[in-house]
Structures are given as structure tokens and as C-alpha cells.
Image (tube, grey):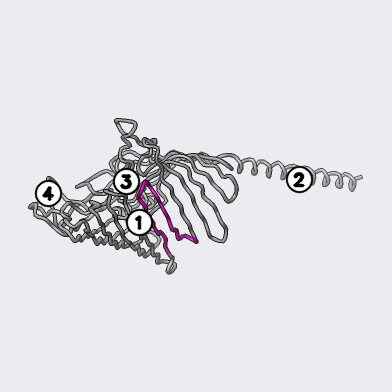
Amino acid sequence: MKTIFNTIYVKYSFILSLFFMATVTFAQEEEEAKPKFALSGSIDAYYRANLNSANSGANYSAPGSSFANLPGFALGMANVIAGYEGEKVGFVADLVFGPRGTDAIFASPMYSATGNIVNQLYAYWNVSDNVTLTFGNFNTFLGYEVISPVANFNYSTSYLFSYGPFSHTGLKADFDLGNDWSAMLAVMNPTDLTEFNPNGKYAYGAQLGYSGQYLNFLADDGSFEVDFTGGFDVSEDFFLGINAAYFDGAEGIGSFAGAAIYPQLTTSENFTIGLRGEYFTETDFFGAIGATDTEGDASVFAVTLTGSATIGDLIIKPELRLDSASEDAFLDADGEPLGSLSSFVIAAIYSF
């Protein structure tokens, strides 16, 4: 009798174990399938000082690029990103506050007289494992650098980034072609018109990517830009980023071309040092390099040396920058024309 009882006990224990395992597995699958809400963002502030020019008043000079151009202790931006990720669909609401955010979205003055705080606002649909549609306002696909200081190695930004588009509003389709190949097609409002379309014209974008290297195209009402963005892990500790672009503007806009390299060396778990070397030239009075260019073909060579120290979620970035222009694009402390500008920046960036 004892043997029969033990056999029955073992059988029912086995059945209960299977039922429990099936219940736990189903619960895990249900939990994994449940859409996920995420909240992230960053804040940044900095100190900036010119080394060979005035640091206040009418003679104050800054590089002809976006962001990190204010004197003394200055604010960057607060960035709050809310996202909802489902199995097939989701959205991103990316809001910015502060001077860097205002520069990034041009205060969006088209609809609201007091400006806007929307950096990105889009919904997406994973149509299949290989196709994703994105509808709304999204940051540009051109260029090596981005608006968020968290995702950039250098704190100040390049001329190529500053004079390309920042964001677009429209519809884009991303394709995973397999074997590390990807592609993207987009139809969008004209560049910088992110709230609505006031003129009925549209811009068209395309991208072809392979293993982290991207060739980008943008056609916009008579203007055209081609851009290459990529990078290589030369070794375990050494990375080399590359960006090159050519912009042919419509009549009256001007043109520019440039190239930049981004060598970065990781010296320890918490510190990386990097350099950005950039050559940028304009034609047809594009207007990026001062107002003294009588021929409309000014150029600038800019070198930026940046250190990046990580302390938990805080990043400290000291930076030395030298901008050397073909024209007297800057002013010295006495207000006299100056062909080069050297400056120092130290930034604190906290991400969550």
C-alpha cells in the first residue's frame, strides 16, 4: 500500500509541477508582450571663456556653430523623453527646455508666438521584422552629430552639423535589407518647417547603410545635400568617426562642403579623450563664416580637443577649441578683426 501511495504522490507532484511551469512561462510571455513605458532625458550646463578675445560686451566672439556659444556660466537644456514601446507600435515625445533646446528647434515660431518645446514627436509602426514606418517630427538622419549632448562626444558642435538640418516632419520608412544592409526613404515638410507646411512644397530624403556606414541624400525645393556618416573601431580602445557633406543651395542660398574626423581613445573605464578636426568651406555667400567674405568663398579649419570623464550618470567634458578662418570672422578684445579664435569650455551633463 505504501508503494502505491508513493507512486500516486509522485505522479500528482509531477503533474502539478508541469502546471506550475506552464503558468509561469505564460506569465513571463504575457509580461514580455506587455507594452513598455519609458522616461529618460538629460540636463547640461557649462562654462565658456575665450582665450584671445573678449568674454562679454560688443566684442564678444564665438565659433560660427550651434550650441555652447554663451559666455561665462551658461545653461544648455533640460531634455525629457517619454516613450511607449509596444510589440508593433509606439511613440516618442521628446521635449526640450533652455537655450540649447531653443537653438535646436529655432523656437518653432510658426504656430505659437511664445515658441515650442517639441524636439521630436512621432509615432511608429513595425509593419514587419524588416519594415518600420515613422510619422511625425524626428531628428535628422544626416550628419555625425546630434542635438542631445549625451549622444555627442564633443560638447560644442561642428560647422557641418550646425548648417545641416536639425529635424524633419513627415513620413519615413526604414528597411532592414539583411546582411548589415539598411535603407530609408522619406517625404517631409521643407527643412526647419516642423510644425506644419505653409507652402505646399516637400523635401525628400533617402539613406543607404551598411554596417554602421551611411550615405544620406536630401532634396529640398531646389537645394540638394549628400552626406556620408560613419566610423570604425580601429582597435578595442580606439574609434575613428567620419563625416563629409556637400550642400548645393537653391538660388540665393549659397553652398558649402566640408569633412570632419573624430578619433577617440579610451584610456580607462571612466575616461576617453577625443579630437574633432574639421574643414568647412562655403561658396556663393552662404554666410556661415562672418560678414567680411567679399568673394563668397570663406573657409575655416577647426580643431576641438575634448575629454570625457564619467562619474556614475554624470559626464564632465573639458574642451579646448581653435577656429582658424580664411577671413577675419572674429573680433579681439579691442574690437579689431581677428582670423582665429581659441576658447575653453567645461560642461556637466547628467542623463537619466
Q: Please, what is the three-letter code of the amino acid marked with disc 3?
A: Asp
Q: Please, what is the three-letter code of the amino acid marked with disc 1?
A: Phe
Q: Position of residue 72 (x, y in %)?
A: 19, 47
Q: Which residues are magenta?
A: 210-231
Looking at the image, which is closer to me, 14 or 70? 70
Decide which of tag 4 and tag 3 comes sooner along the chain. Answer: 3
Decide which of tag 2 and tag 4 comes sooner along the chain. Answer: 2
**Mark 4, other Cα within 10 Å: few <14 / some 14–19 / many ≥20:** some
- For residue 348, side relative to residue 205 (left or right): left
Q: Please, what is the three-letter code of the amino acid marked with disc 2?
A: Leu
SS at mark 2 in the image: helix
Q: Nearest to the eye among marks 2 and 4: give it.
A: 4
Residue reaching furthest to the bottom: 235
Q: Position of residue 290 (x, y in %)?
A: 19, 52
Q: Which mark is residue 18?
A: 2
Decide which of tag 4 and tag 1 comes sooner along the chain. Answer: 4
Q: Please, what is the three-letter code of the amino acid marked with disc 4?
A: Asn
Magenta-drawn stretch, dominant element (helix, strand or loop): strand
Q: Which residue is mark 1?
A: 153
Residue 97's image quarter? Answer: top left
Residue drawn at (42%, 69%) of the image: 234
